[in-house]
Image (cartoon, rainbow, N blue to C red):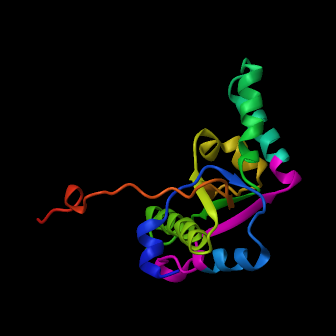
Amino acid sequence: MEALDVLLNRVSLARLQAPAPSAEQREILFRAALRAPDHGYMRPWRFLCVEGEGRERLGELFASALLNKNPEAAPEAQAKARAMPLRAPLLVVVIARVQANPKVPEIEQLLSAGCAAHGILLAAHAQGLGAIWRTGEMAHDRFVADGLGLEANEQIVGFLYLGSVEGERRSPPELKTADFVSNW
């Protein structure tokens, strides 16, 4: 796939099914992530792959986080939390590893980790895979971060859901650049 086609036509796809990306496809996904802009070559990111039974364990972690925040959470809400990781055969947890550096502020490190996540999404699209970047409450919950083994200086940038496209691949909406670009 041509680079401009990937950049201009990538869309988030929520309807994902097995199979998950192969080992070869994953290698390309992560190689793309490692090309993200990185001031100071700090490599302020890391990735956790969650698949198979790990998705059920992550669902239990999500349900526990919900109950930790709200012990009165309805059974339906708990079931929804448990089911969230089951929406794709592979989840990649993108983690920002913020390090003290007098020349590279925290925001640049977070943005770099976000660019790494975007690299994974672009590489997924280029390989014909489906992907969507999800955040929500669980991405910002310290209980979840601790359950995933994150250190104090780490935070979740997002959960990338990856798999094979279920149904038709939709086209991106047409946006007018003039609505977003101006001269100063």
In magenta segment, residue 42 = yes
Report whether residue 45 is seen.
Answer: yes
Residue 48 located left or right of residue 133 = right
Residue 58 magenta-highlighted: no
Extent of the magenta region: 32-55
Is the residue 126 above or below the residue 20 in the image? below
Figure quadrant of residue 183: bottom left
Which of these two is toward me, 134 or 131? Answer: 131
Labels in figure, total = 0
Q: Find the residue positioned furthest to the left.
A: 184
Whether 117 is drawn above or below 61: the answer is: below
In the rendered image, residue 24, in percent from the top left (x then y), is placed at 75, 80
Q: Quadrant of residue 128?
A: bottom right
**Residue at x-position 48% and y-position 73%:** 6
Q: Is residue 75 above or below residue 93?
A: above
- Location of the C terminus by quadrant is bottom left
Q: Nearer the viewer, residue 2 or 70?
A: 2
Q: Position of residue 173 (x, y in %)?
A: 38, 54
